[in-house]
Image (cartoon, helix red, strand yellow):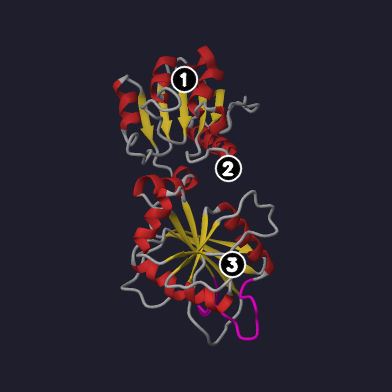
Amino acid sequence: MSRRSAGGDPGGEGDPGGHGAETGFFARAVELAEHGRGKVADHPLVGAVVVRDREVVGEGWYEYDLVRHAESAALEQAGERARGATLYVTLEPCSHHGRTPPCADAIVAAGIARVVVGARDPNPVVDGRGVERLRKAGIDVELLDSFEARRQNEAWRVWKGLGRPFVTYKAAVTLDGRVTVPGRRWVSGEAARHLVHEQRAAADAVAVGMGTVRVDAPRLDARGVGAQRQPRRLAFGRGPLPDGAGLELRSGPIDDELRSLAADGVQSLLLEGGPTLATAFLRSGLVDKLLFFVAPVLAGTGPHVLGDLDGPLDLLHPTVTQVGEDALFEAYLREP
């Protein structure tokens, strides 16, 4: 799918070196990719922008039902103005035949002079081959290895590259690291709990451990957020499940269970289990991202968010965002 830009140069004209414009054009490609959110099936989000003489002449993004890849849509819109132009694309162009011919071939045929690629494609049938095809054709290729581009497809990248779901561990904690507050039902506030339901709606699966099942009888569904679908609801550990739990029991080794889920198309797993399950995942190196909703309260007693680990774990790209009265701490365990 494609759409014309009304703005010309997103980077502004007051930048004689062009760096701001470069950044703006690529940011536009990332923005366009988001138009495909929820519409790409098991494919990645991709956005593309064609720029000639500092003017946007073609734009596109990928949607599964429309078949055309982002690059092809942008090139078609640009037409002859693509010759000698620069293509900004969030993901490495494919070089193999699938539902469509290779995007790399289309880029060469269009006469593009330069391609700025946000991130490599971890799919084994693509990884590096698209960039190689372009360079062999004499096209100048710049690989940004952009965190924004990688983060945009973080779940898909782990699913394709590592053969398991992308695992996010979510917890609500007090300032002293506890997961319960005496006399209270909830640790976090209403805004944080609403956001958790949005996260469930976006995940392919949500999981807890059997300890949490027995104590809390969690539903794990997405409520009050207009969810288009519900995630698979899982319990890791030894059964049996209580009657009416409505959960799917996964009793095998964690790594085996994750690979089985990936084979079923589960790209993302939101882990909401207690300290025992979370610690087991972390010790196995199977957590990719942390989301801690930190409440402004000292519990003084109660279980901690994690058990003992084998050693310290460095966190990457940490951010803190205010969510109602709570602070959301987000960080990665590995580069997405």
Q: How far across and how far down the image is residue 263, in percent?
A: 40, 49
Q: How far across and how far down the image is residue 44, in percent?
A: 47, 39
Label 1: which residue?
85
Residue 25 is tagged as none
Measure the C-alpha gap from mark 1 to mark 3. 44 Å
Q: Is residue 44 above or below residue 201?
A: above
Q: Classify 10 Å Cα crowding around label 3: few (below 14), some (14-19), many (20 and above).
A: some
Magenta span covers which residues? 172-188
Q: How far across and how far down the image is residue 29, in percent?
A: 53, 34
Residue 38 is tagged as 2
Label 3: which residue?
327
For marks 2 and 3 on the same chain, the one whose residue lies earlier in the sequence: 2
Q: How would you classify the magenta stretch by its main secondary structure?
A: loop
Q: Is residue 25 magenta?
A: no
Q: Is residue 157 above or below residue 65?
A: below
Q: Classify 10 Å Cα crowding around label 2: few (below 14), some (14-19), many (20 and above).
A: few
For marks 1 and 2 on the same chain, the one whose residue lies earlier in the sequence: 2
Q: Is residue 136 above or below residue 238?
A: above
> For residue 120, what is the image quadrant?
top left
* Residue 176 relative to residue 165: left or right: right
Instruction: Tell whether label 2 touches label 1 (CB within 8 Å).
Output: no
Measure the C-alpha gap from mark 2 to mark 3. 28 Å
The residue at the point 36 percent across, 27 percent down is: 96
Q: Is residue 180 magenta?
A: yes
